[in-house]
């Protein structure tokens, strides 16, 4: 299906082939003709960042991004210090593995009352009330980005803000739209703070075309990630991502919007999906390539 | 808990007490001191709109809204005609039961490939591709609102656009933000097309404060609906709504934003939640009143 297809900008995010080691994923991607891989820190740390860099380079691939930094919403001193420390380590890792793009999932709210447990009658009402303050939580994200930006710049690494689908606003990311991510990036140089356009998270946004154009004009598109929105949602909604073409996302249209900005970087496929994880790695790598060749590459 | 609390603006949406008949729900709301009820068409149709109007009026309550019209996204002639016919009937029903506010859920995309079924290899690829075109789908919503607005105006009924959480963009509503709903309403008079601010659907929106202010300035806030965002999501995400205080929504803040616009209408509580539906109606009605008195009413 993909014979002759140009896969030079296709990047396999290692989360898509979750059960493969970094070396196995890199080998599979290289054999299939991909141009790059996106790495998760857990797989990098198994062999060390220096060795990971060598594995990828020896295979003739690029590292399109490192996933991930972030979780910046702590309000207590210890939590803030821990977040800064972890993200500085991630910045160093990104530079070491050979990518300038470190994807950030910024973190969610502090409130976590659990279903059916009435917060108003518990001891921690005040803490929970503060934990629900999404405006203040977003300000802490902005503050932490400001703290980290100089360190990232020194290491030649870009903090890449990932707006997550609003379904994850409570527990994973209080940054929910591309426009909001760009507003957070605005105080910083474009090569220090950027954004990722992940179709799964932003396909629904009525302002998407305008914000993609803005992101491109500002030079902040650090990564274009593609996967599909499946229904019904998986029991763990994080795992509802699917192969391009299996769900509701209009890949030709969004890809044209991204391409129209002049974006010339890699197109990373990052799919969390139990059924895909249970499929043989080479089958997954081939299927991703086929769908990319049919639904994305022609519109780049 | 609610003795002495001012419940005059509190409205019980009959979906919250799903198992009660309209008459039972109205009686329960009246006994508990609520000022209004929001009605669903299924419960209205059981006894007829005229009788429903009398039941509510006899109890000394207002009808804050009728749920619901909408589902405007069909692209074929028969689907369009059916949507217009059904919505005209709903408009007449709203006027008959004595409310000017008819809530619209606008409908989702046409594509429905189902998980794991590759759309690209099926016969209906063209149809599915069209079904994924969210830009065109939204235009059809705008067109149908234009078709219906004169009829609604003649009957003194407002088409109330409900932005739904982006989690429902594929299957229920391609209108996902308050700003987008206001853009759709903009060509029409404020008393003909309005919006509902439902905390469940919009709490996450980084632009919420500005768009609530805009909605108020434009005179388009037709309803303020409150319920909480629970995690983990229910197996059917529609049923993940909860009592105020049980989840992540910052009710004091959002209520202040709504109140600052001068909104003086009812505050409707519409909760879809199996556990709440399995609870005795009077317990639900009392709990809603308690949470409203603690978390919403003081900030109006």
Image: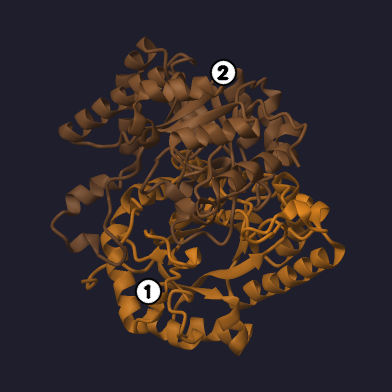
Chain colours: A orange, B brown
Q: Name the disc covering residue A145, or none.
A: none
Q: Is residue A268 above or below residue A187?
A: below
Label 2, secondary structure: give it.
Answer: loop
Residue A41 falls in which quadrant of the image? bottom right
Q: Position of residue B151 (x, y in %)?
A: 32, 15
Q: Residue at x 36, y 17 (%)?
A: B152
- The residue that disc 2 covers is B218
Q: Position of residue B37 (x, y in %)?
A: 53, 30
Q: Residue furthest left?
A: B123
Q: Name the disc covering residue A34, or none.
A: 1
Between B15 and B147, the one nearer to me in the picture: B15
Label 1, secondary structure: give it.
Answer: loop
The quadrant of the picture occupied by the C terminus of chain A is bottom left
Residue B85 falls in which quadrant of the image? top left
Q: Position of residue B75 (x, y in %)?
A: 22, 36
Q: Is residue A288 above or below residue B294?
A: below
Q: Residue at x 16, y 60 (%)?
A: B122
Q: Residue at x 37, y 75 (%)?
A: A276
Q: Residue at x 44, y 74 (%)?
A: A16
**Chain label for disc 2:** B
Number of the front mark, 1 or 2 = 2
Count of numbered tags: 2
Q: Residues within 10 Å of mark 2 (few under 14, many from 20)?
A: some
Q: Residue furthest right?
A: A77
Label pair 1/2, CB-CB below 8 angstroms: no
**Chain label for disc 1:** A
Distance between mark 1 and mark 2 Cα atoms: 52 Å
Q: Is residue A132 above or below residue B195?
A: below
Between A95 and B277, the one nearer to me in the picture: B277
């Amino acid at each position: 299906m993909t014979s002759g297809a140009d896969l030079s900008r296709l990047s396999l995010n290692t989360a898509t082939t979750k059960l493969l080691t970094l070396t196995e994923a890199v080998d599979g991607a290289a054999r299939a003709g991909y141009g790059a891989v996106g790495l998760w820190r857990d797989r990098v740390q198994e062999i060390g960042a220096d060795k990971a860099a060598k594995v990828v380079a020896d295979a003739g691939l690029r590292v399109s991004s490192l996933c991930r930094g972030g979780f910046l919403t702590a309000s207590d001193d210890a939590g803030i210090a821990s977040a800064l420390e972890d993200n500085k380590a991630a910045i160093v890792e990104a530079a070491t593995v050979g990518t300038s793009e470190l994807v950030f999932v910024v973190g969610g709210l502090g409130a976590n009352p659990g279903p059916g447990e009435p917060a108003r009658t518990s001891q921690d009402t005040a803490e929970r009330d503060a934990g629900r303050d999404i405006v203040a939580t977003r300000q802490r994200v902005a503050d932490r980005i400001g703290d980290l930006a100089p360190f990232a710049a020194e290491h030649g690494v870009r903090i890449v803000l990932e707006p997550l689908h609003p379904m994850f606003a409570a527990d994973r990311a209080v940054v929910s739209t591309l426009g909001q991510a760009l507003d957070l990036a605005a105080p910083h140089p474009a090569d220090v703070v950027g954004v990722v356009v992940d179709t799964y998270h932003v396909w629904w946004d009525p302002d998407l075309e305008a914000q993609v154009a803005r992101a491109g004009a500002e030079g902040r598109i650090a990564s274009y990630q593609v996967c599909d929105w499946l229904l019904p949602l998986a029991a763990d909604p994080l795992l509802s991502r699917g192969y391009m073409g299996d769900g509701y996302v209009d890949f030709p249209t969004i890809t044209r919007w991204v391409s129209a900005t002049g974006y010339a970087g890699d197109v990373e496929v990052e799919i969390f999906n139990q059924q895909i994880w249970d499929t043989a790695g080479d089958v997954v790598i081939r299927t991703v390539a086929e769908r990319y060749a049919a639904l994305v590459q022609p519109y780049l």
